[in-house]
Amino acid sequence: MTAQAQTASLIERFSLQGRAALVTGSSRGIGRAIALMFASAGATVGVNARHEEGCREAVDEIRAAGGTALSIPGHVGNAEGCEAVVSAMLRDAGRLDVLVNNAGTNPQFGPLLDADEGAITRIWEVNVLAAIRLTKHAVNGWMREHGGSVINIASVAGIKPEALTGAYNASKAALISVTKTLARELGPSGIRVNAIAPGLVETRLAKVLVETPQIHEHIVGQSALGRHAQPDEIAGAALFLASDASTFVTGSVLTVDGGWTT
């Protein structure tokens, strides 16, 4: 085989040509970076967020770069919203090969025992139950008969929790457990389920952590690379898990944290 043929074969392994991917919470941050990368790899990407305007902006960016994208607005923080989002994706794309459960929230900061239970419930609904509900609808609507890849965006907070974000930490630990359970249960149907655990990434959700010098220095000071990440540095891991480059990978938690958990 020539070097050119080997290169072509390698590129094909990472191609998402002919596939459809739904990325929740993809109007900004990590989700938007994943949507852009998936589209550049040939996927038809469903951009989901609560507000239609944000979805449209991301879709326009993808289309301007030559990709194919659909606006799938909807709130995944409740059961009805999850079902509606997957139904809209299947209606508009005709298939659903890759599901990225990226939408997340963290309205609680402070001692866990002082946390408002309403905030904890909201975190659980968006960070854990949404992933379960969306996966259920994706499996029943397409993947059980055709196979697929589910990628849950967890966090190093679910592996090595720190103080003051206890509800968020617990939700991400639960999401990692959900990932491993679903990998076991769905493997016989040809459905792979994996998680990515990012470290500190410069997003709106992590704005306080990035912009507060004491907190930022505490976090990056513990990492091997000594810095935080940009959203597109997480997207490459998602492309690997979505593509045929990872056909024997399931139930895994891919840590992308600059060596913070090393």
Image (cartoon, rainbow, N blue to C red):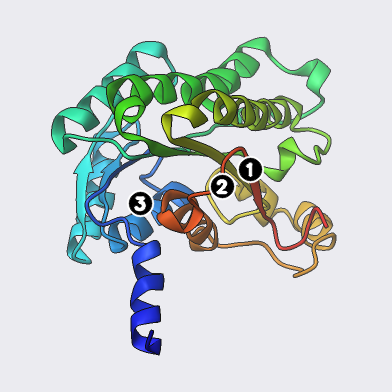
Q: Is residue 89 above or below residue 259?
A: above
Q: On the picture, is 199 further left or further right than 135?
A: right
Which residue is found at the position 52% from the left and 33% from the top? 104
For residue 114, which quarter of the picture?
Answer: top right
Tell me the quarter of the image containing the N terminus. bottom left
Tell me the quarter of the image containing the C terminus. bottom right
Nearer to us of marks 2 and 1 is 2
Residue 239 visible in rendering? yes
Q: What residue type is labelled 1?
A: Ser
Which x, y percent locates residue 115? 74, 18
Q: Which of 137 and 229 is in front in this view?
A: 137
Determine which residue is flagged by label 2: 249
Which residue is found at the position 34% from the left and 86% from the top? 4
Residue 74 visible in rendering? no
Mark 1, other Cα within 10 Å: few <14 / some 14–19 / many ≥20: some
The local secondary structure at tag 2 comes to loop
The local secondary structure at tag 1 comes to loop
Q: On the picture, is 23 further left or further right than 181?
A: left
Which x, y percent locates residue 190? 43, 35
Q: Are marks 2 and 1 in contact (CB under 8 Å)?
A: yes
Mark 3, other Cα within 10 Å: few <14 / some 14–19 / many ≥20: many
Determine which residue is flagged by label 1: 252
Q: Which of 30 and 193 is in front in this view?
A: 193
For residue 100, which quarter of the picture?
Answer: top left
Which x, y percent locates residue 38? 34, 55
Q: Are marks 2 and 3 in contact (CB under 8 Å)?
A: no
Q: What residue type is labelled 2?
A: Val
Q: Nearer the viewer, residue 10 or 23?
A: 10
The local secondary structure at tag 3 comes to helix
Q: On the picture, is 222 further left or further right than 141?
A: right
Disc ID at residue 35: 3
